[in-house]
Image (cartoon, helix red, strand yellow):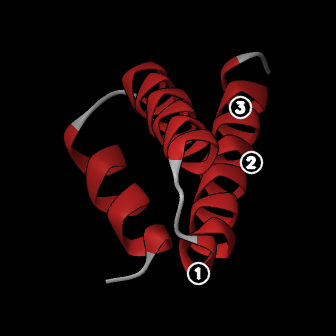
């Protein structure tokens, strides 16, 4: 399942505010994993996931503030 699919399912279950908070938390989780990993092969995955969820958070907060 792709991140976009996960995001849409969460949006169907929860408010946009709660979903934005979820995105912020998941992004932070991947930032923590990125900084803690010793496996160089995982860095690009954690980096991608962190940035993807961070961008989703930013886009959702823009919608909230409209």
Question: Vertically, is 42 above or below 55?
Answer: below
* Frontmost residue, 29 versus 35: 35
| Of 14 and 36, the residue lying toward us | 36
Query: Quick one: label 3 or label 1, which is nearer the N terminus?
Result: 1
Q: What residue is shown at x 58% (from left), y 81% (from top)?
A: 41
Q: Which one is nearer the viewer's eye here, 12 or 37?
A: 37
Helix, strand or loop at disc 2? helix
Residue for badge 1: 41
> SS at mark 1?
helix
Q: Residues within 10 Å of mark 3 (few under 14, many from 20)?
A: few
At x 46%, y 28%, the residue is 25
User: Which residue, given by chain and number where applicable, does mark 2 sit on?
Assistant: 55
Q: Is residue 58 left or right of residue 50?
A: right
Separation (CA) of disc 1 from disc 2: 23 Å
Q: Is residue 23 left or right of residue 34?
A: left
Residue 17: percent from left, percent from top: 47, 20
Label whose residue precedes the other's in the sequence (1 or 2)? 1
Which residue corresponds to mark 3?
Answer: 63
Q: Nearer the viewer, mark 3 or mark 1?
A: 1
Query: Is 9 located above or below residue 2 in the figure?
Result: above
Dot 3: what SS?
Answer: helix
Quadrant where the C terminus is found in the figure: top right
Q: Which quadrant of the rendered structure holds the N terminus?
A: bottom left
Instruction: Name which residue lies at 55% across and 31% down.
Output: 28
Residue 45: image x %, image y %?
Answer: 58, 73
């Amino acid at each position: 399942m792709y991140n976009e699919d996960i995001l849409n399912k969460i949006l169907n279950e929860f408010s946009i505010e709660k979903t934005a908070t979820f995105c912020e938390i998941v992004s932070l989780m991947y930032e923590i994993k990125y900084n803690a990993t010793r496996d160089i092969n995982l860095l690009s995955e954690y980096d991608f996931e962190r940035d993807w969820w961070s961008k989703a958070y930013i886009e959702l907060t823009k919608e909230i503030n409209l």
